[in-house]
Image: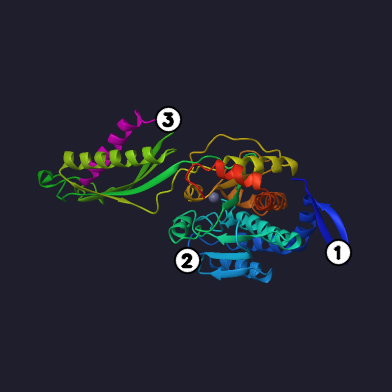
Amino acid sequence: MSNRLRKETAGKIFMETLKEVLGACYKVHAKEIEDLVIQIHDHPELSGEEELAARVQADFLESRGFEVKRNYKGLNTAFAATAGEGRPHICFMSEYDALPGMGHGCGHNLIAGVALGAGVLLKQLLSDQGVKGRVTVMGTPAEEKRGCKIDLIEAGALKDVDIVLMAHPSNRATSQSVEESGIMQFAVRFSGKSAHAAAAPEDGLNALDAVRLLFCGVDAWRQQLPETCRVHGVITDGGVAPNIIPDSAAADFYLRAFDMDFLLSMKTRFENIAQGAALMTGTTALVETVKHTYKPGKPNRELNQAFMKLAGEYGMAPEWLERSRASSDFGDVTYEVPAIHGFFNITGQAKGITIHSKEFAGCAASPFALGQMEKTAKILSEIGYRYLTSEDFRKKVKDAFPFGSI
Ligand SMILES: [Zn+2]
């Protein structure tokens, strides 16, 4: 990807490398992008409430000549900003929600910075080089809580998109987009009958016992589950006082697996265990799915290879990492079109900083993190440019897409 590009300045034609062009272009926007990323960091907004973050990004892109749709697909804090025409159509995704009690402990303010940077860089390349195609920066709200990428997909937001690129900050090495677990989330409530626990326990049906048996059933099941799966729960309602047989008790559970069919089979088993606990206690069980199901993330191999090669060229010392048991609504994106969300390290030499912590939130506004964000924005724009200009690369990416043709 070290093609030399034609550049015209004051009537004179120069030939520059792609990296020289991107470097000069980013400089023009750098201060505003960095200010915006710090502003989002310093005004953390929870999932679905990201009004300032959505507005400042949409304003910025509008000021750079993008055609902006706010309240995209009926979601208050979603947006889509597009430049260029026709196909191929490259989409950079932005996230910008914070976590309760710790601000940007997942560093999503930097995801926004990468998407904005990549967007303006690729737009510039499109117009300077006369390349056919389109670039969209898509603002996707509430990753931490609801998973609005799934709402956007269901509303057709990726229908005419060819590839999706995103990048997430990390406390580990800069790495490829790793395979991630799918997740299903359940709220279980048992209903029984209250009674005096000492004077008339025989009149009661104990809903807390049903919750305890649900946990026991899950623990027995766990022994036979593949090592890659996860089931974890908490009791959210265990009754009110020891002298009252609880007539109502509840628990939340998460189920995770790397294979969607297996995850669905786990759902059936989990529901059966809950019904078994109800049978044993004479209570009734209500098992409800909460939020969206996130599919297991299946990143595109060719896009990953391009990301890793470029991360090396930008001096980010990338490492291929193991798959992760974490889950994201980005998983669903990987079933729609070839897609990756690579990881870029923002903690530098500091050790022992975990993601989803106040310490990580501190790193998410550091000069080092902003430097890594800049490099990553350039990487994503280079991948987008390559997809637009290389038929060979397009074919490889499509051939590696295992979920149908695009
Ligand atoms: Zn995150």
Q: Are marks 1 and 3 in contact (CB under 8 Å)?
A: no
Tell me the residue at 35%/32% (across/down): 222
**Which residue carries the number 1 mark?**
9
Tell me the residue at 34%/28% (across/down): 224
Q: Position of residue 238 (x, y in %)?
A: 28, 47
Tell me the residue at 24%/44% (across/down): 208
Q: Is residue 7 magenta?
A: no
Taking depth in this image into account, of 144 and 353 the one nearest to the observer is 144
**Which residue carries the number 2 mark?**
73
Q: Which residues are magenta?
A: 207-226
Closer to viewer: mark 2 or mark 3: 2
CA–CA distance in space, label 2 to label 3: 39 Å
Sequence-wise, the earlier of marks 1 and 2 is: 1
Q: Position of residue 220 (x, y in %)?
A: 30, 30
Amino acid at the residue labelled 2: Lys
Amino acid at the residue labelled 3: Glu
Sequence-wise, the earlier of marks 1 and 3 is: 1
